[in-house]
């Protein structure tokens, strides 16, 4: 049987979901037999091929993240969101109630340890969006594995359900928002 | 009450007429999710989680506000209802910031639990997030409206259970928030800091600075016991993780006695005064120096033994705080009277006891406290005379009882106080006699009610004729009057005044064939225990007559009572030797020759006697710091040195 092609990205987040994915331990061996990883933060491949499953960790807070997400959506049949940032906005969304300029000023100029600070911007770094958004505010998402980070068992459950041909919905006792 | 029969989910169940559909469901173990419902509060149907289908209703209705009737056919669970509930949850999650990873209540939150239950793994709506200001100025509590779902449980608790109704909704629409008074910071409002709103909050919108980020209730060991601080004896449920106390709740806030105050709820979590962590002895250079427990006990026993041998047992006096537990007081009494053979034993509030007993003795044959009423009697009264008390300061739960009796039972409150009326919002009449003229006012009222003649005011009393007549009318009309007096009366140490209070209660009661109902809000939690035990049986104050009685050495048992130095400023003068047994490094402790450490009430088992004489047992919540023994152990150790 042909292997299921998977691509993953981490957007605005801490990479904790991918770390939690690696916590599935020995199960990764069986998974590797069934799945081919293409572009992921771990494989360091730069382009998305056409894949079966796209996985997104992290929320969308700047123009680059928005572009990468749309690119992934265009290249995958099923998009799965990992973690609170992707599902709800998570810790990154803390800045959403503040004005963007205020956040940048505080971060790059007014921090106590900063001397002669300068706010970076395009073209050097991508511009911030006004608000940090969960991925389903930008593109269609097919399934979600929330948690900060999701338990390894929840991530594995999500992948196994997909491999079995079902769209996963976490059972209540696997649900975590923190 | 009439029984009604309903069909819920195809099953016939019974309920009482007057119950809501939700109450019938809960009584029959039928699971219906709720958020804004809380036992003991009126239901408002705010959250819509408990929606059910009822035959012949066009749309789902909230079970919590729908009266149960005979023949209702109810569905609590179907696909449509579950879909609606999830939608409602999604709307709640998106209106304000309910991202759990940012919230103090995560892991201990009813909204989060429902999110899990309904497998809400995403939300379909953009966030509204109106960025509302957080109020964190209060000493213990923070209100973060960004986590609020506007269920109103805090508001209804503050209104219906606590009685003060400080909290209410302010603003409208998406800016609707919980405000204190007319939008004051909570710390500057009429809030009595009882923390009931914190316990009522299903999310992280109201949280305690004393408990935040220490741990979650589900991870804790629960210990249910009674708070002995003021003598009312409220039940508490303590949550302990390892040996750390993280939170104190009321075991059942829906009950009359389910109230707590800031002293019970937050006191044990606050370190307001520096602790005595080790025993200390004054060294040859005159400085207090830490030592072992054995050294401290040896020194105390040796020195006290010398005074006993050379100057006789009566050169030693023992004074105890009514905050100590009954076992401790018993051991102390034995040590002072039997081991040392001294007759000078007293409590810090001994003078108050002597005045009360003398006052009661002047009024009835048996001069004891057995006629004092339980606090619940406030709810049976339609007239309350509050004399010389600031209940929200000294006994906040009693304050709540009084305010609730006024607001909910329409009881009339008369305040008798020359200087202040802290319950002015609830007062029918404030009698403001001149200083020391309270007894005169009470006596003229009693006389008028007894004889049925018109009350006469005397110019020097400071209360005018009109007010007195009004008071006489209110008391005369009342079916049940209750007299509550507090420290303002007790501190006058005036037997005549106590007697006048009893007389008025008795005159009013006997005209209706009842007994006088009197409650005294004593200054210490175990005052009654100390008094009943005979700690204060001396005829005059020991504290004020140290020199006259030739007392050389004093053993002061404070336990977890913090005594301001000014309260006992004259104490150490003229003494050759002072032992202080205390929790706190107060200025008083710093004058001692030997300091013996006490545990706090949360750190030792103890028996106490409540205001009305009810004995209670308090169990230990946490272990005391290393090396600190229970107070009675320490006292018994000293006694052992004399055997």
Image (tube, coloured by chain):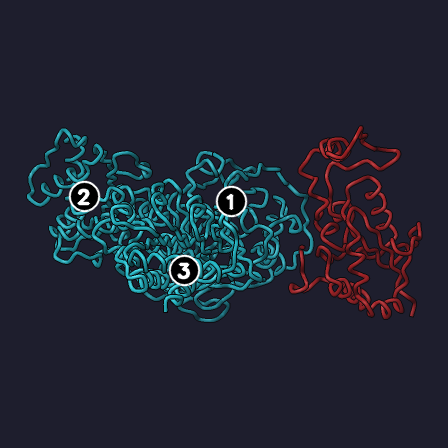
Chain colours: A red, B cyan
User: What is the quadrant of the N terminus of chain B in the image?
Assistant: bottom left
Residue that mark 2 sits on: B497
Q: Residue visible at 9% across and 41% down? A: B448
Q: Residue visible at 45% across and 41% down? A: B167
**Depicted B218 relative to depicted B189: above or below:** below
Q: CA distance from mark 1 to mark 3?
A: 49 Å
B261 vs B271, left or right, is left
Indicate the position of residue B133 as horizontal and vertical percent values: 58, 36
Q: Tell me if I can see residue B374 in this picture.
A: no
- The lab-note entry on whether marks 2 and 1 share a chain reads yes
Q: Pick whichever, B532 or B15, lies toward us.
A: B532
Query: Does the residue at mark 3 contact the one at mark 2 (Cβ under 8 Å)?
Result: no
Q: Pick whichever, B488 or A155, lies toward us.
A: B488
Name the chain letter of the residue that bears numbered label 3: B
Q: Residue B302: which disc? A: 3
B162 vs B60, left or right, is left
Q: Secondary structure at mark 1?
A: strand
Indicate the position of residue B200 as horizontal and vertical percent values: 48, 52
Query: Does the residue at mark 2 contact the one at mark 1 (Cβ under 8 Å)?
Result: no
- The lab-note entry on whether marks 1 and 3 share a chain reads yes
| Mark closer to the chain start, 2 or 1 | 1
Q: Which of label 1 and label 3 is nearer to you?
A: 3
Q: For residue B14, what is the image quadrant?
A: bottom left
B529 vs B174, left or right, is left
Q: Residue B141: which disc? A: 1
């Amino acid at each position: 049987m042909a292997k299921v092609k998977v691509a993953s990205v981490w957007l605005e987040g801490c990479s904790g979901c991918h770390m939690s994915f690696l916590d599935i331990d020995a199960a990764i061996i069986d998974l590797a037999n069934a799945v081919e990883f293409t572009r992921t933060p771990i494989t360091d491949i730069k382009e998305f091929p056409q894949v079966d499953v796209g996985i997104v960790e992290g929320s969308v807070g700047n123009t680059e993240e928005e572009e990468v997400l749309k690119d992934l959506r265009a290249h995958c049949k099923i998009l799965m969101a990992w973690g609170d940032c992707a599902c709800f906005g998570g810790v990154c969304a803390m800045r959403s109630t503040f004005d963007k300029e205020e956040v940048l000023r505080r971060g790059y100029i007014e921090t106590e340890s900063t001397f002669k600070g300068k706010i970076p911007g395009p073209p050097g770094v991508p511009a911030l969006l006004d608000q940090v958004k969960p991925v389903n505010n930008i593109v269609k998402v097919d399934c979600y594995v929330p948690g900060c980070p999701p338990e390894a068992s929840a991530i594995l459950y999500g992948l196994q359900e997909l491999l079995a041909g079902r769209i996963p919905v976490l059972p209540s006792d696997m649900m975590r928002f923190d | 009450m009439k029984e009604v029969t309903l069909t819920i989910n195809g099953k016939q169940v019974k309920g009482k007429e007057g119950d809501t559909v939700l109450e019938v469901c809960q009584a029959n173990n039928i699971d219906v999710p709720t958020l804004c419902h809380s036992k003991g509060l009126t239901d408002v149907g705010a959250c819509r989680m408990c929606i059910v289908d009822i035959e012949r209703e066009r749309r789902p209705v909230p079970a919590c506000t729908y009266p149960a009737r005979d023949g209702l056919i109810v569905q609590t669970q179907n696909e449509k209802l579950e879909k609606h509930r999830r939608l409602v949850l999604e709307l709640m999650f998106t209106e304000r910031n309910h991202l759990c990873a940012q919230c103090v209540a995560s892991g201990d939150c009813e909204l989060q639990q429902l999110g899990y239950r309904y497998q809400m793994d995403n939300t379909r709506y953009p966030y509204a997030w109106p960025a509302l200001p957080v109020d964190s100025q209060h000493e213990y509590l923070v209100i973060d409206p960004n986590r609020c779902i506007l269920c109103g449980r805090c508001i209804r608790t503050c209104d219906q259970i606590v009685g003060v109704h400080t909290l209410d909704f302010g603003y409208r629409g998406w800016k609707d928030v919980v405000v204190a008074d007319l939008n004051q910071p909570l710390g500057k409002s009429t809030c009595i800091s009882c923390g009931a709103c914190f316990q009522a909050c299903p999310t992280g919108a109201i949280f305690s600075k004393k408990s935040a980020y220490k741990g979650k209730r589900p991870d804790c060991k629960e210990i249910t016991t009674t708070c002995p601080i003021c003598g009312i004896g409220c039940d508490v449920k303590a949550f302990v993780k390892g040996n750390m106390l993280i939170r104190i709740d009321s075991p059942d806030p829906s009950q009359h006695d389910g109230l707590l105050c800031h002293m019970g709820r937050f006191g044990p979590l606050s370190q307001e005064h520096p602790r005595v962590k080790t025993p200390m002895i004054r060294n040859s250079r005159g400085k207090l120096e830490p030592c072992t427990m054995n050294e401290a006990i040896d020194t105390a026993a040796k020195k006290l033994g010398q005074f006993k041998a050379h100057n006789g047992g009566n050169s030693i006096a023992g004074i105890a705080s009514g905050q100590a537990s009954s076992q401790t007081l018993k051991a102390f009494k034995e040590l002072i009277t039997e081991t040392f053979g001294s007759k000078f034993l007293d409590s810090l509030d001994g003078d108050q006891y002597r005045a009360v007993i003398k006052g009661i003795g002047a009024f009835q044959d048996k001069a004891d406290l057995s006629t004092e009423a339980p606090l619940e009697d406030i709810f049976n009264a339609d007239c309350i005379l509050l004399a010389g008390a600031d209940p929200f300061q000294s006994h906040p739960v009693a304050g709540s009882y009084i305010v609730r009796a006024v607001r909910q039972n329409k009881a009339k409150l008369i305040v008798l106080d020359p200087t202040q009326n802290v319950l002015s919002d609830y007062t029918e009449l404030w009698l403001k006699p001149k200083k020391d003229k309270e007894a005169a006012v009470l006596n003229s009222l009693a006389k008028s009610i007894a004889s049925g003649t018109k009350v006469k005011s005397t110019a020097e009393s400071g209360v005018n004729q009109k007010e007195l007549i009004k008071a006489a009318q209110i008391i005369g009309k009342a079916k049940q009057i209750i007299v509550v007096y507090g420290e303002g009366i007790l501190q006058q140490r005036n037997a005549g005044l106590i007697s006048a209070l009893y007389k008025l209660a008795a005159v009013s009661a006997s005209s209706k064939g009842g007994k006088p109902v009197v409650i005294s809000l004593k200054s210490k939690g175990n005052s009654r225990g100390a008094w009943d035990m005979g700690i204060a049986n001396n005829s005059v104050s020991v504290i004020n007559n140290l020199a006259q009685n030739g007392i050389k050495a004093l053993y002061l048992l404070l336990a977890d009572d913090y005594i301001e130095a000014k309260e006992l400023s004259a104490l150490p003068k003229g003494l050759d030797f002072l032992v202080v047994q205390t929790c706190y490094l107060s200025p008083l402790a710093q004058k001692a020759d030997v300091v013996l450490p006490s545990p706090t009430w949360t750190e030792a088992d103890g028996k106490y006697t409540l205001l009305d004489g009810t004995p209670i047992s308090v169990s230990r919540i946490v272990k005391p710091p290393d090396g600190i023994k229970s107070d009675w152990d320490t006292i018994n150790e000293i006694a052992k040195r004399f055997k």
